[in-house]
Image: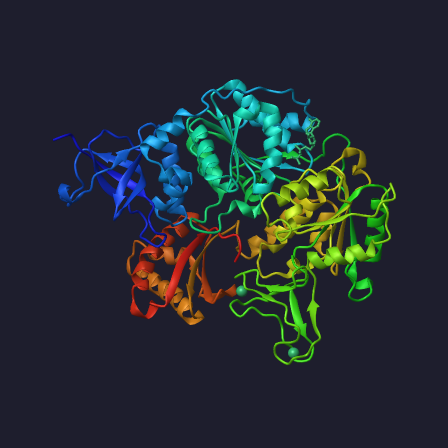
C-alpha cells in the first residue's frame, strides 16, 4: 500500500453554499499547499487547490470514505503562501466561499487542462523575457520629490497629482528603480477600465520592452489569459498590467503595486465576491512586503481620509500623502466657466455662448468634447393626452428611446421593442420624447454647427462614443484612434470618454447637464460628480502650448453650488474637506463602515421579510449571550427597504444596511449573520426568496 496524504482542497463551490467548505481527498503522491490537483466532485472531475496537507485522515471520517485525487498538476510551482492568504482573507472579508474565490482567481482555461496539456503549455513558455530600458525624460521637481519620499518611506502612498502632472512617469521610474535594485522583482500596475489598458501598455512597453510586460483583463482570449498568468506565476514577466481582476494574479516576486485612478468605482467588483481591488492592493502589499502606490487627481474620500496629516489631537492616517499639484512643463489646468441655465431661454440644450465657443475652436482646428451621462436619444417617451410613459413591464425603470433603430430599450433587463406608432393606451399618434441622451445631443449639435467650417474649409466632423457606439469588438479602439489622429472635431459621449485618455488636441470640454447628481439620494453622488468633472477637465489642454486657452464649461441651474465653486478653483482638498465634514456629521463612510445585505424575491414583501427576520433573529441571539451582546450596540442594523432600482427583470429587490464605526465589529456581525441567514432561509415562510448576498463596503446604497 502506497503512503497516503490527506489534503484539504479548495474547489469551485456554489455561491450560496456555506462559507469555508474545503473538501478532503486522499493523495498517494507527496503534495504541498498551493499545488493544483484534479479531483472528483460528484460525477465531475474538477480543478482544486491544495490548501492543507495532513499525515492522517480527518477525525471522525473513515479513510475509505475519502475519495482519491485524480492527478497532480506537478509541472506548476505551488501558489505561494501570500497568494493563499490573500484569497483566504478576501473570502472571509467579502463573505464568500474560499473555493469560489480561489478558483475564480485562476485563469479559466486552467480549469479544463489535463496535466499533459498543461505540461505542453509550460514547455512553450518564453522563459527569458528580456528587459530593455529606454531613456526617460528628466523629471520635474515635483516628480523628483515624490520619488525621493517614496524611497525614504514605507507607504502605502497616496499620490495626489493633477491630471497631466506626470503620474504615469512616476510609475515608470518607480518600476525602473525597483528593477535596478532587484532584477528579479515584479510590479503590478492596475487601471480601472479595460479601455485604458492599451494606452498604458504602450507606454510601459516603450520603456521596458514588449517582453517584460503581460496584461490581464477580461477582453483577452482564454489562451492569452493563461499565457499571461503563467508568465507572472513563474516570475518571468516583470510587469503585470491589468484591471481589477489582476489583484488576484500569482506574482511571487511582487515588490510594487500601483493603483492608477484609485478613486474609480470600477475597482469594486459588482458580482460574486464583491471585492475592492484597491483595498486588496493595500492588504496584499503588506503580505508581500511590496510598496503600494495609490494615485489620483481626485482621490476617494476613503484614501484621502486615510492619508490625512497628523494634528495635535489626531495621529493622522496610515497612508503617506504625496503631492504633484502642477501640470508638466508650462501646462495649466483649464479655466472653468459656468453657464447659468436659469438665464437661458427655456428648454435650451446647448447655450448660445457655449455653441459660439465650440464654433470658434472648430474654426481654429481644435477639438471639443461634450459630456452627457445618458445614452440613447431620450430617456422616456410620453403621451401628453393620457399620461402614458415608456415604462418597462419587467423593471421599475423607463425604456429608453433609441432613434437610430427606432426602438425602446430597457437598459436594465434588455427588453427591446419597436417604438409604437401611436400611444399603446389611448391611440394618440403624437407621442413625444422627454429629456435627452447622447444620440439626440449629437443630432442637435449637427444642426447647430451645420454651417461651421474647419480651417481647410471642410465641414465640421462630430462623433459619439458611448456604450451603444462601441458595442462591436474593436469599435472603441478605432473610435479613440480617430479622435487621437484628429479626424474628429467635436466628440460627444458619456463618462466613458472622460477618464484617463491622453487626448492631445482637445481644448474645450463641456458638461451639458450635470445637475441631477447634485440631488441624488446616494451620499457618494457628489464625490462621483466632482471626480468626473475634474477628470473631464483633465482632458482639456493636455498639450502645454494650448493649455492656457483651454476651458471646461459647466451648464447648470445651480452655478453657485459649492461643488462647482470648488471645481472652478480645481480645489479638490476644499471639496474633500467639506464632504468629510458632512460625512462626519452624518456618521457615514469613511468615518463609519457599511455592509449591505440584499435579498431578491418575486415580491417585495418576501424579500424584506427575510431581511427583517434575519435582523431580529441575529439581534436576539447575540443579546442572549453576554460575550456577544455588545456587538448589538456597536453595529446598527437598519430595517429592510426596497432598493432604489426596486424591480429588475421581474425580480423584487430589498436591502438592509449594517453600519458601525468599528470595522472589526462589523466583520464579526457579518460572520454571525451568515449563520443566521442559513437558518432563517430554510424556514418555510422564506421559501420564496430567490437569493441573498452581502456587499461589504458597498459603493452605492
Ligand atoms: P498623468 O498620468 O498625471 O495624467 P502623464 O504621466 O500622462 O500624466 O504625463 C502627462 C504628459 O507629460 C505625458 O505626455 C508625459 O509623456 C509627459 N511627461 C511626464 N513627465 C514628464 C517629464 N518629466 N518631462 C517631460 N514630459 C513629461
Ligand atoms: Zn396616450
Ligand atoms: Zn427592464
Residue 341: % across, % down: 78, 61
Residue 372: % across, % down: 69, 55
Front one among 665 and 683: 683
**Left or right relative to 364: residue 303:** left
Res 673 visible: yes
Q: Does residue 439 sit above or below 232 in this rendering? A: below
Q: Residue at x 72, y 59 (%)?
A: 440
Q: Residue at x 65, y 20 (%)?
A: 135
Front one among 50 and 670: 50
Q: Quadrant of residue 98?
A: top left
Residue 599: % across, % down: 42, 62
Task: Determine the residue located farthest toward the left in the rendered image.
Answer: 1
Res 106 visible: no
| Quarter, ligand 2 | bottom right
Q: Quadrant of residue 260?
A: top right
> Looking at the rendering, in which quadrant would you find the N terminus?
top left
Q: Residue at x 50, y 25 (%)?
A: 238
Front one among 310 and 202: 202
Amino acid at each position: 500500500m502506497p503512503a497516503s496524504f490527506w489534503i484539504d482542497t479548495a474547489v469551485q463551490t456554489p455561491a450560496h453554499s456555506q462559507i469555508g467548505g474545503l473538501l478532503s481527498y486522499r493523495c498517494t503522491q507527496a503534495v504541498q499547499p498551493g499545488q493544483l490537483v484534479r479531483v472528483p466532485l460528484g460525477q465531475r472531475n474538477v480543478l482544486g487547490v491544495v490548501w492543507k496537507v495532513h499525515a492522517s485522515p480527518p477525525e471522525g471520517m473513515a479513510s475509505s470514505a475519502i475519495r482519491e485525487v485524480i492527478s497532480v498538476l506537478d509541472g506548476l510551482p505551488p501558489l505561494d503562501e501570500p497568494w493563499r492568504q490573500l484569497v483566504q482573507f478576501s473570502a472571509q472579508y467579502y463573505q464568500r466561499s474560499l473555493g469560489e474565490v480561489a478558483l475564480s482567481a485562476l485563469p479559466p482555461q486552467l480549469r479544463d487542462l489535463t496535466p499533459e496539456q498543461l505540461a505542453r503549455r509550460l514547455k512553450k513558455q518564453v522563459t527569458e523575457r528580456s528587459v530593455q530600458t529606454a531613456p526617460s525624460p528628466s523629471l520635474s521637481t515635483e516628480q523628483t520629490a515624490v520619488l525621493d519620499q517614496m524611497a525614504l518611506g514605507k507607504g502605502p502612498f497616496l499620490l495626489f497629482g493633477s491630471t497631466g502632472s506626470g503620474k504615469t512617469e512616476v510609475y515608470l521610474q518607480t518600476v525602473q528603480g525597483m528593477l535596478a535594485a532587484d532584477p528579479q522583482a515584479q510590479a503590478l500596475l492596475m487601471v480601472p477600465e479595460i479601455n485604458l489598458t492599451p494606452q498604458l501598455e504602450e507606454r510601459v512597453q516603450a520603456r521596458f520592452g514588449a517582453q517584460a510586460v503581460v496584461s490581464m483583463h477580461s477582453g483577452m482570449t482564454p489562451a492569452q489569459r493563461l499565457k499571461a498568468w503563467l508568465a507572472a506565476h513563474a516570475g518571468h514577466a516583470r510587469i503585470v498590467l491589468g484591471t481589477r481582476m489582476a489583484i488576484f494574479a500569482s506574482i511571487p516576486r511582487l515588490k510594487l503595486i500601483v493603483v492608477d485612478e484609485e478613486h474609480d468605482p470600477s475597482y469594486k467588483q459588482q458580482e460574486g465576491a464583491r471585492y475592492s481591488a484597491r483595498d486588496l492592493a493595500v492588504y496584499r502589499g503588506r503580505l508581500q512586503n511590496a510598496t503600494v502606490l495609490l494615485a489620483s487627481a481626485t482621490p476617494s474620500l476613503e484614501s484621502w481620509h486615510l492619508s490625512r496629516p497628523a494634528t495635535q489631537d489626531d495621529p493622522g492616517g496610515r497612508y503617506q500623502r504625496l503631492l504633484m499639484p502642477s501640470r508638466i512643463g508650462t501646462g495649466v489646468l483649464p479655466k472653468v466657466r459656468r453657464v447659468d441655465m436659469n438665464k437661458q431661454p427655456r428648454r435650451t440644450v446647448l447655450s448660445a455662448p457655449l455653441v459660439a465657443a465650440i464654433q470658434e475652436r472648430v474654426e481654429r482646428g481644435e477639438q471639443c468634447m461634450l459630456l452627457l451621462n445618458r445614452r440613447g436619444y431620450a430617456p422616456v417617451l410620453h403621451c401628453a393626452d393620457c399620461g402614458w410613459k415608456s415604462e418597462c413591464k419587467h423593471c421599475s425603470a423607463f425604456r429608453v428611446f433609441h432613434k437610430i433603430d427606432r426602438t425602446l430599450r430597457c437598459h436594465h433587463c434588455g427588453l427591446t421593442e419597436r417604438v409604437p406608432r401611436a400611444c399603446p393606451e389611448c391611440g394618440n399618434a403624437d407621442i413625444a420624447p422627454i429629456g435627452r441622451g447622447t444620440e439626440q445631443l449629437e443630432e442637435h449639435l449637427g444642426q447647430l454647427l451645420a454651417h461651421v467650417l474647419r480651417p481647410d474649409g471642410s465641414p465640421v466632423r462630430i462623433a459619439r462614443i458611448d456604450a451603444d457606439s462601441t458595442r462591436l469588438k474593436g469599435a472603441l479602439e478605432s473610435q479613440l484612434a480617430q479622435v487621437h489622429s484628429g479626424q474628429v472635431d467635436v466628440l460627444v459621449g458619456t463618462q466613458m470618454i472622460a477618464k484617463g485618455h491622453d487626448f492631445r488636441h482637445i481644448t474645450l470640454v463641456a458638461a451639458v447637464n450635470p445637475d441631477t447628481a447634485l440631488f441624488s439620494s446616494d451620499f457618494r453622488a457628489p464625490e462621483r460628480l466632482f471626480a468626473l468633472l475634474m477628470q473631464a477637465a483633465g482632458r482639456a489642454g493636455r498639450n502645454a502650448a494650448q493649455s492656457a486657452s483651454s476651458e471646461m464649461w459647466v451648464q447648470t441651474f445651480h452655478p453657485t453650488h459649492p461643488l462647482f465653486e470648488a471645481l472652478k478653483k480645481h480645489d479638490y482638498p476644499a471639496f474633500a474637506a467639506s464632504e468629510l465634514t458632512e460625512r462626519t456629521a452624518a456618521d457615514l463612510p469613511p468615518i463609519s463602515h457599511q455592509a449591505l445585505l440584499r435579498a431578491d424575491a418575486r415580491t417585495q414583501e418576501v424579500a424584506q421579510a427575510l431581511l427583517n427576520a434575519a435582523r431580529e433573529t441575529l439581534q436576539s441571539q447575540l443579546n442572549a449571550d453576554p460575550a456577544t451582546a455588545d456587538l448589538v450596540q456597536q453595529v446598527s442594523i437598519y430595517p429592510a427597504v426596497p432598493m432604489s432600482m426596486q424591480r429588475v427583470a421581474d425580480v423584487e429587490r430589498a436591502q438592509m444596511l449594517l453600519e458601525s464605526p468599528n470595522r472589526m465589529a462589523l466583520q464579526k456581525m457579518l460572520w454571525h449573520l451568515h449563520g443566521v441567514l442559513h437558518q432563517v432561509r430554510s424556514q418555510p415562510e422564506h421559501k420564496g426568496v430567490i437569493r441573498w448576498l452581502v456587499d461589504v463596503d458597498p459603493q452605492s446604497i
